[in-house]
Amino acid sequence: MREFPTKFNPNNLSQFQQFKYERDICYLREAIYEHYLNEKVANNETKNDEYNPYETPFDLQKFIFARNPPRITEMVKAICVELEKLGWLTTVGHANSAIWIYPKSGPLPKSLPEW
């Protein structure tokens, strides 16, 4: 950060929780995007079969541990809606443990539990 945002001032104290939510959801988007970009490299180094980056779910617990977002359930719901608008299906693991993100066409991820 080169300088503080102009909204970081005493007049906005009542909005700081909303600022945190907005920042946390940006970091969640970035973390999910980076996870799937990096997953290809890992899979292609070890496997010669068809590339399915969605077999490995995004680990929400790591994100929660790193950022401690107070409104994680609300954030995950919003992220899932965004992803579904982009053509993905999503499944959230028990107690926000992980998010499986996979294409609407094709088989379900083999790693997706049957609850």
Image (cartoon, helix red, strand yellow):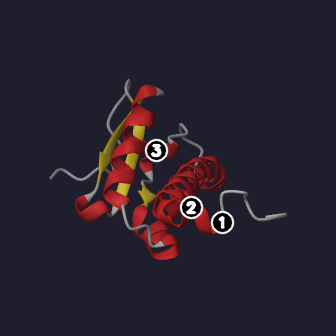
Mark closest to the chain's N terminus, 3 or 2: 2
Name the residue at 64% across, 53% down: 38
Q: Residues within 10 Å of mark 2 (few under 14, many from 20)?
A: few
Disc 3 residue type (three-letter): Tyr
Q: Residues within 10 Å of mark 3 (few under 14, many from 20)?
A: many
Do the numbered discs 2 and 1 sit on residues whose CB atoms are within 8 Å?
yes
User: Which picture quadrant has residue 72?
Assistant: bottom left
Name the residue at 57% across, 52% down: 26
Question: Residue beneath label 2, please?
Answer: 12
The Cα–Cα distance between marks 1 and 3, rounded to whole angstroms, is 42 Å
Question: Residue beneath label 1, please?
Answer: 9
Name the residue at 43% across, 62% down: 59
Looking at the picture, how far across and down is residue 108, in whole percent? 32, 37
Q: Quadrant of the N terminus?
A: bottom right
Please give left or right for residue 67 compared with residue 106 in the image. right
Q: Which mark is residue 20?
A: none
Question: Residue beneath label 3, please?
Answer: 54
Looking at the picture, how far across and down is residue 24, in whole percent? 52, 59
Disc 1 residue type (three-letter): Asn
Q: Residue furthest front?
A: 11
Mark closest to the chain's N terminus, 1 or 3: 1
